[in-house]
Amino acid sequence: MSAHESMEQAEHAEHASSENKKIALLIAVIALCLALSETLGKGAQTESISKNVEASNLWAFFQAKSIRRTTVQTAAEQGKLSLAGAADDATKAALQKQIDEWQKTATRYRSEPETGEGTEQLAERAKHAEHERDESTAKYHHFELASAAFQIAIVLASATIITGIAALAWISGLLTLAGIAVTAFGIFQPHLLPLH
């Protein structure tokens, strides 16, 4: 082998090494993006599950309060019927007092703003928890899609080192940009892209 050929081989090896370093740096950046999207995705998934449990609990409490309210209202209606057949004024007064208490209790079960535990407040809180659950679920879907794009990008960038096909690195870079865009949508506008 001549000195000229040796020099050409050394230049080629140095160029390949330089290109491999660039691809390795690209893979490192993509891995960082993947780690971030996975972390955001797990956080959104946990929040979604938590808000789903919260909404379920609130709806169960709502149902319990509704049943109690219906029971008390039924008792008050029954008391009204008994009131008509009461013989003396003392019995009528006692029965009317009990009916008033039942109606007051039924009203409190419907709306209790000071505790937030009336059926109206419980329904509002449950709907809010459902909204937050849906928001977190939408974010989760974006982060999962972004993670898939980053994983494919890493595979393609790795294949570039083995095959030397530069187009794979470009596709990897485009997938990375797409993953970053989907992550940004997940953070700022999770309902803009209909992913679920």
Image: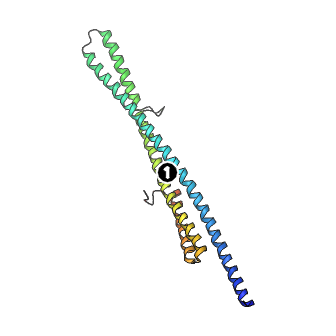
Considering depth in this image, is 77 or 138 the residue closer to the camera? 138
Quarter of the figure with residue 30: bottom right
Q: Is residue 12 left or right of residue 69?
A: right
Residue plotted at (51% across, 50% down):
45
Residue 182 higher or lower than 39, as above or below: below
Q: Is residue 9 left or right of residue 149?
A: right
Disc 1 secondary structure class: helix
**Looking at the picture, how far across and down is residue 90, in whole percent?**
32, 9
**Looking at the picture, how far across and down is residue 134, in whole percent?**
45, 50
Considering depth in this image, is 147 or 113 the residue closer to the camera? 147
**Looking at the picture, how far across and down is residue 136, in whole percent?**
49, 51
Mark 1 is on which residue type?
Answer: Ser
Q: Is residue 164 left or right of residue 114?
A: right
Question: Which color scheme is applied?
Answer: rainbow
Q: In the rendered image, which residue does mark 1 sit on? A: 136
Q: Quadrant of the N terminus?
A: bottom right
Residue plotted at (30% across, 19% down):
79
